[in-house]
Amino acid sequence: MAVTVLVTGAAGQVGRDLVQVLAASVPPAGVATALLGATPVLPGEFDVVELDHSKLDVTNAVACRKVITAAAPEVVVHLAAYTAVDRAESDVARAQLVNEIGTRNVVAAAEESSAHLIALSTDYVFAGDLGRALDEGDRVGPLSVYGRTKLDAERACPPGATIVRTSWVAGLTGRSVVHLAAAAAQSGAELRFVDDQVGTWTSAADLAAGLVQLIRVRPQGIVHVAGSGGASWYEIVRRAVELSGGSVDQVQAISTAQLDPAPAAKRPPFSPLVSRRLGEFGSTPLPHWTDGLGRLVRAIDHEAR
Ligand SMILES: NC(=O)c1ccc[n+]([C@@H]2O[C@H](COP(=O)([O-])OP(=O)(O)OC[C@H]3O[C@@H](n4cnc5c(N)ncnc54)[C@H](OP(=O)(O)O)[C@@H]3O)[C@@H](O)[C@H]2O)c1
């Protein structure tokens, strides 16, 4: 029997890869297969109820209840969120509404459906001031409105839910720094990226594969799921330009203080994520960030041909 998985925010960066992987719709020689190496899902293992913003506005409690209970999912993966980190600083009420109240609405509807909830969260719940990688037990201390509202969303989840913290995600869809690096490699353009923000870059395809594991196991509490290893934005973009056939000299390191205009939101300076929980249920960490980045660069190149 297929497991019914309902996904909110399904048209976003994370949602598009997750839906594709869950639906096992990846063609054998397709780009997404190249991104993952292998499809981690058996055909027919999951029925996917894919809800983008137009199909479900999570700030509408009545709609959440109606749409989610009608689908009768076994698992709800809650991805819908206000993710414009800088805009949130001047749009606090909306960020709070979508991230905290929206999560409360999804929690209530999932509970009514007796569905297991998997809610996505972020490294921005941390202050990033410990100078080391952060695990699930580390103290939180968000520096931004986005981080605070995502922490409120975590706290709105019941103890039985899975809260997945991830970070710095990019996939084939959308315009990520990897797309920017690939374009710069072609044109020879110079790029400037900060070297004083260190975190974990995560391939959306690898995250989707990690989420499939969690959908099967349904652990309780917080689990960190991000690429392995840490790097600054400067190092990530430099590697992406190099992998795309450009020169590392095209990328200059700058400090956050040199950004012009200065970003509205503060980011944690050092927030690589590690997990001490994945092993509990036999899950392995995601591949090293350079590995996922290499596959994404090849897929972008393949698409451009
Ligand atoms: N991408 C990352 O680097 C990253 C890192 C850490 C954690 N996360 C978390 O991962 C989850 C997915 O992020 P993502 O990267 O896929 O973000 P995304 O690309 O911004 O997607 C979020 C989706 O939520 C939708 N949405 C916004 N308001 C909504 C509402 N009121 N009701 C229903 N849908 C709404 C958006 O639709 P519209 O565009 O139409 O508004 C968008 O499709 C989020 O919880 C995010 O906080 C992401």
Image (spheres, rainbow, N blue to C red):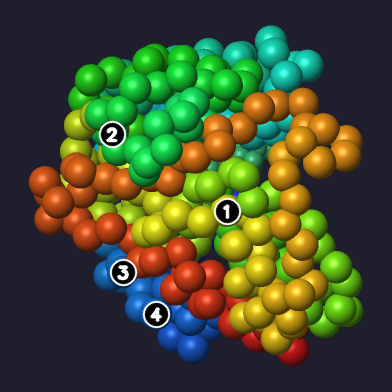
Q: CA distance from mark 1 to mark 3?
A: 30 Å
In the shown orientation, is residue 81 left or right of residue 184? left
Label 3 sits on what residue type? Pro
Label 4 sits on what residue type? Gly
Circle 3 packing at 10 Å, graded few (<14), some (14-19), many (20+), is some
Circle 2 packing at 10 Å, graded few (<14), some (14-19), many (20+), is some
Discs 3/4, front: 4
The structure residue drawn at horizontal position 28% and vertical position 18%, both measured from the top left corner, is 158
Q: Which mark is residue 232?
A: 1
- Whichever of callouts 2 and 1 sits on the residue coming sooner in the sequence is 2
x, y (%) of residue 88? 71, 23
- Are the residues flagged by discs 2 and 1 in contact, CB closer than 8 Å? no
Q: CA distance from mark 4 to mark 2?
A: 28 Å
Label 2 sits on what residue type? Glu
Q: State the SS at label 4.
A: loop
Which residue is labeled 2 in the image?
136
- Nearest the viewer among 26 and 223 is 223
Q: CA distance from mark 2 to mark 1?
A: 21 Å
Q: CA distance from mark 1 to mark 4?
A: 26 Å
Quadrant assignment, res 133: top left
Label 1 sits on what residue type? Ser
Q: Is residue 270 above or below residue 249?
A: above
Which residue is labeled 3 in the image?
40
Q: Quadrant of the C terminus?
A: bottom right
Ligand 1 falls in which quarter?
A: top right
Q: CA distance from mark 3 to mark 4?
A: 9 Å
x, y (%) of residue 242? 66, 79
Discs 1/3, front: 1
Which residue is labeled 4 in the image?
37
Q: Is residue 161 above or below residue 300?
A: above
